[in-house]
Image: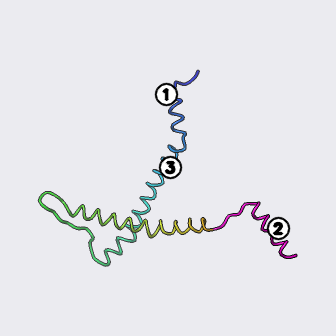
Amino acid sequence: MKPPPIIIDFKEFILKGNAISLAVGVIIGTSFGKLVTAFSDGIINPLLNLIGGNPDIALKLWVFDVGMVINALISLVITGAILFFIFVKPMNRLQKKDVDAPTRSAEETLLTEIRDLLAKR
């Protein structure tokens, strides 16, 4: 018995590379977020506490808690700095090394060897 067309369409959708890549990206992003949070909570925040005490800002204007927004903004900047300097810059350096390395085809290698042998004669 053949499955209904909706099941076939769903199977095609779920097995597409984009859907699988997106799912993997979300899962890895969640784990990466936990890593960045642990790094900032375990290393950066204690350093900030040593330097300046409690980093929480309490600022209420009428019924609005502006301090909460300022805390979130500071957290965003710190998290962005951690991501950039600890993860993005080193990964860019690694990728640049891979790109900078010249890759030769088998034909180019063979022609280079022939050229070198002819130059020796």
Q: Is 35 colored magenta in this rendering?
A: no
- Please state, as top left, top right, bottom left or bottom right, where the N terminus lies in the image: top right
Q: Earlier in the sequence, mark 1 or mark 2?
A: 1
- Please state, as top left, top right, bottom left or bottom right, where the C terminus lies in the image: bottom right
Q: Which residue is mark 1?
A: 6
Q: Is 106 colored magenta in this rendering?
A: yes
Give how far across and how far down residue 81 sits, in percent: 39, 68
- Secondary structure mostly seen in magenta is helix
- Which amino acid type corresponds to the residue marked 3 in the rendered image? Val
Q: Which residue is mark 2?
A: 114
Dot 2: element = helix
Residue for point 48% across, 51% down: 25
How far apart marks 2 and 3 lie (CA) works out to: 47 Å
Give the left or right position of residue 39, taking residue 9 as reference: left
Viewer-closest of 48 and 105: 105
What range is drawn magenta here? 101-121
Residue for point 56% across, 65% down: 95
- Which amino acid type corresponds to the residue marked 1 in the rendered image? Ile
How far apart marks 1 and 2 lie (CA) works out to: 61 Å
Q: Earlier in the sequence, mark 3 or mark 1?
A: 1
Give the left or right position of residue 83, taking residue 69 as reference: right
Q: Which residue is mark 3?
A: 24
Q: Residues within 10 Å of mark 2 (few under 14, many from 20)?
A: few
